[in-house]
Image (cartoon, grey):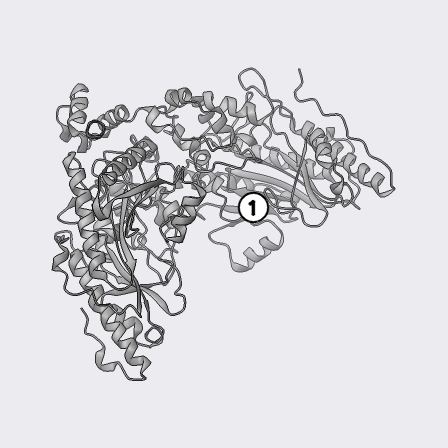
Amino acid sequence: MPFGNTHNNFKLNYKVEEEFPDLSKHNNHMAKVLTKEIYGKLRDKQTPSGYTLDDVIQTGVDNPGHPFIMTVGCVAGDEESYEVFKDLLDPVISDRHGGYKPTDKHKTDLNHENLKGGDDLDPNYVLSSRVRTGRSIKGFTLPPHNSRGERRIIERLSIEALNSLDGEFKGKYYPLKTMTDAEQEQLIADHFLFDKPVSPLLTCAGMARDWPDGRGIWHNENKTFLVWVNEEDHLRVISMQKGGNMREVFRRFCVGLQKIEEIFKKHDRGFMWNEHLGYILTCPSNLGTGLRGGVHVKLSKLSTHPKFEEILTRLRLQKRGTGGVDTASVGGVFDISNADRLGSSEVEQVQLVVDGVKLMVEMEKKLEKGESIDSMIPAQK
Amino acid sequence: MASSFTRLISKRNTAVLLAGLGAGTAGFLLSENSSLAAEAKKKLYPPSSDYPDLRKHNNCMASALTPAIYAKLRDKVTPNNWTLDQCIQTGVDNPGHPFIKTVGCVAGDEESYEVFAELFDPVIKDRHNGYDPRVMKHPTDLDASKITHGMFDENYVLSSRVRTGRSIRGLSLPPACSRAERREVERVVVTALAGLKGDLAGHYYSLGDMTEKEQQQLIDDHFLFDKPVSPLLTCAFMARDWPDARGIWHNNDKTFLIWVNEEDHTRVISMEKGGNMKRVFERFCNGLKQVEHLIQERGWEFMWNERLGYVLTCPSNLGTGLRAGVHVRLPKLSKDPRFSKILDNLRLQKRGTGGVDTAATGDTFDISNLDRLGKSEVELVQLLVDGVNYLIECEKRLEKGQDIKIPSPIVQFRK
């Protein structure tokens, strides 16, 4: 809650042992890292906006997780959370992002011309291509913590910035609150509409408060560039199109993002970014580039091959169902995207997707012909 | 466009504001001194910018919360540092249904009802048929011997049940409590219950530690409560840290049971198969009195005052917090078009046999008292008893092909 959390000071009347959460049945990064010592050290701290340790970890306490799926189990309420609660978040970040150290520096590269290839993925297999990231506006708290007033200003700032885009980026904003039924149907048909979060991972972190106040969707006339406002992050920026031309998708992504950032900077406001963590977002899993670049690709044969998972791991890719995170694949079509976010640049991550998907499509074709793919199995990237 | 943009977010403005507060430079915003930053933020975000959009809402909070009341109360805190925004979050997140008016706000502690009285008083008045906490007093009466005709025809009444809630004074309520407080509630209650004897002697089952076998037995007995899924509860922060410090206590006879740390500190339930509502209510009163005595021995007490009666999390449960009800078969009456009106006039409500917001199965209904505040426990149970007897009479008459009458409405509050 905004304007300071004096309720936290009241809890300090109780000893650490009395307040420490029971994490004995939990499987998430926060539960693996949080000891009574760390809890004792951090529990009387607050960020300048009043976000506390209990706020950071509530979602991880309420969602013990699954033995096979390791969730993060904590969120940031503002930019300063990553500083004030370093003792918890640095080890969580290290666990989640392949050993990333507190002294490491993150590289940002949004120059789409540095991408090699990516315009020739076979559209018989690659049905669609998409790149998304998030951006947080400096000076405001994040979705788990922000007040209605802050959220509305974020919406207003975003609309003003987006409405000043032109050319291929000219578009329109649809606030969730006042959308007509016809608009809603169209947005669903376009696969653009986002729902009120039902995942307890998000709701327990306070991100669905006051829904749908201050939330909306902006997209360009061509329906290839879209921005979600105030869902899990201040902004989620998405570039997408049917077919396999990831190069074009990435070009539009980079150009659009940079135009938006320029407009914010012109008014003395930027995105949250620093050279250690890259772009600052609500969930520690999205730090760095916050980028998920992926395709919907038909891999009916490869997906049933015993080495499928290993191939994905070596290519630094992950699979999801075509409904997004935590959904199952339908008809042999998978969502394949980069697994990394922090420690490598946007160009590097999209390059991995482009190269990796190209290889997997070739493997699929081989398997269709009844040939072996053993010689094609890549080394660990 | 540019000017409104810059006015909204110019760092220079913030610096000017902070300088006005005597803070110096804009760098102060990022310092450890959170209270000055909080002050500056309050000026940047006046209550009007934070006032929720309630135009599509149908709940008591939305009807009562004007921008003026919000502005007055937004920056207040209770002694436990609970705020108005936290009280109303559930009502903002759940616009409700045009046909069902929910309450839309909860208390975080006993003092919420005082500190935010300007919101809670009109909400209470709306929900409790005009009961005005500013001028009226609530009567408490747990003398079960006063109940008459409390034995129902068991050809119709399948089971009888009385429930209420009790809060432990000095500890925050489920929306606000920290883990330590919740564990303290559990400790206080479980220690007291261990002192019950005779037909009330029993056992505590902690939700976190129960075995599969115990869990299955509790489900079969219809005792087990689940982690809340209703957004009315989850948006009010009541499911935090589940299942830490939650549990169920029941006596060996399985006729008296207590839920610990679900929607309230305790929910106390007396129930039996059959129609002996008088005995159910006797056990209810007797058990409550004994538990109260046992916690008083250790220096604790229940939250109660003469304005609001027993203080519970949801304003709808203030007063007696009492819901007395039966599962009753009414195959003919339930199809009669006058059924709803009869229930209304008798101050009764129907629910499905799964409890609140469920549908009836077959012809069996859960019938219980509508009111909670402004009438005593004895009065409400007597109303239920008289009402159910009347419904059974109607059913018997319809069976014989005779006609039934809609009874005159019952008077609200004593003058």
The residue lying at 53 percent from left, 37 percent from top is B97
Q: Position of residue A65 (x, y in %)?
A: 38, 56
Asked if residue B17 is positioned above or below residue B219 in the image, the reply reads above
Q: Position of residue B36 (x, y in %)?
A: 22, 25
Quadrant the N terminus of chain A occupies: top left
The residue lying at 58 percent from left, 17 percent from top is B136
Q: Quadrant of residue A3?
A: top left
> Would residue A46 be seen by someone viewing this image from the given angle?
no
Asked if residue B172 is positioned above or below residue A87 in the image, the reply reads above
> Would residue B328 be seen by someone viewing this image from the given angle?
yes
Q: Position of residue B164 (x, y in %)?
A: 59, 35
Quadrant the C terminus of chain A occupies: bottom left
Q: What type is the residue that disc 1 sits on?
A: Trp
Q: Residues within 10 Å of mark 1 (few under 14, many from 20)?
A: many
Asked if residue B54 is positioned above or below residue B184 in the image, the reply reads above
Q: Position of residue B346 (x, y in %)?
A: 72, 30
Secondary structure state at the residue bearing disc 1 = strand
The answer to which of A110 and A21 lies nearer the viewer is A110
The residue lying at 44 percent from left, 47 percent from top is B242
The answer to which of B238 and A248 lies nearer the viewer is A248
The answer to which of B42 and A165 lies nearer the viewer is A165
* Residue at image mark 1: B249
Chain that bears disc 1: B
Asked if residue A45 is positioned above or below residue A188 in the image, the reply reads above
Image-based side of B161 in relation to B300, left or right: right
Outermost residue, bottom side: A371
